[in-house]
Amino acid sequence: LMLIVISYTNPEPIFRQIIDQIKTAITTGELEVGEKLPSIREMASELKVSVITVKRAYSELESEGLIMTRAGLGSFVAEVDQEQVKMDLFAGYRLELENIIASAKVHDIPLTELKQLFNQLLKEDGKKKGRN
């Protein structure tokens, strides 16, 4: 089974967390074209979330052309343009960062402090990766 980590402190809805992590796995090649995904029930059980949540994530991934579902066989990674997937992910990151910047301005948080926080998080993430 692929590793998907659900964070209940993350403001993103659970189905969106599943989508983003599967997209990343496809982009990085962790999931290859034609690879079978866990069934909706298997993933729901593994993540301890509702079947409806996983079904929604798979449905959205299918509508974006990232996975294909064959009745009775399951869901598989579709042949996709890796560069397009990456560009879509970056567009999403950009939008999230724009929202954070707008929120900081509304709350009179200096953008220099926001930049320091971002750099601190990047540095901490780099240290975590170094330990693994």
Image (cartoon, rainbow, N blue to C red):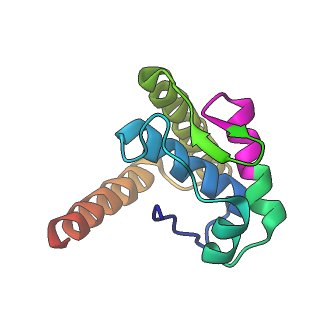
Q: Quadrant of residue 55?
A: bottom right
Is 54 one of the magenta-colored residues? no
Counting from the top left corner in percent of width and height, residue 24 is at 46, 45
Question: Where does the magenta region start and end?
Answer: 57-68
**Count of marks placed on residues:** 0
Counting from the top left corner in percent of width and height, residue 16 is at 68, 52
Quarter of the image with the C terminus in it: bottom left
Could you tell me which residue is drawn at 57 percent across and 52 percent down?
Answer: 37
Whether residue 42 is visible here, answered yes or no, is yes
Nearest to the observer: residue 99 or residue 5: 5
Whether residue 8 is visible here, answered yes or no, is no
Could you tell me which residue is drawn at 68 percent across and 79 percent down?
Answer: 48
Counting from the top left corner in percent of width and height, residue 3 is at 46, 65
Farthest residue, direction right = 52
Q: Please, is residue 112 above or below residue 27 in the view?
A: below
Counting from the top left corner in percent of width and height, residue 22 is at 54, 49
Could you tell me which residue is drawn at 79 percent across and 71 percent down?
Answer: 50
Could you tell me which residue is drawn at 56 percent across and 31 percent down?
Answer: 78
Q: Is residue 86 left or right of residue 102?
A: left
Is 65 one of the magenta-colored residues? yes
Q: Please, is residue 9 above or below residue 29 in the view?
A: below
Farthest residue, direction left = 130
Nearest to the observer: residue 6 or residue 41: 41
Nearest to the observer: residue 24 or residue 55: 55
Q: Is residue 60 left or right of residue 93?
A: right
Nearest to the observer: residue 36 or residue 28: 36
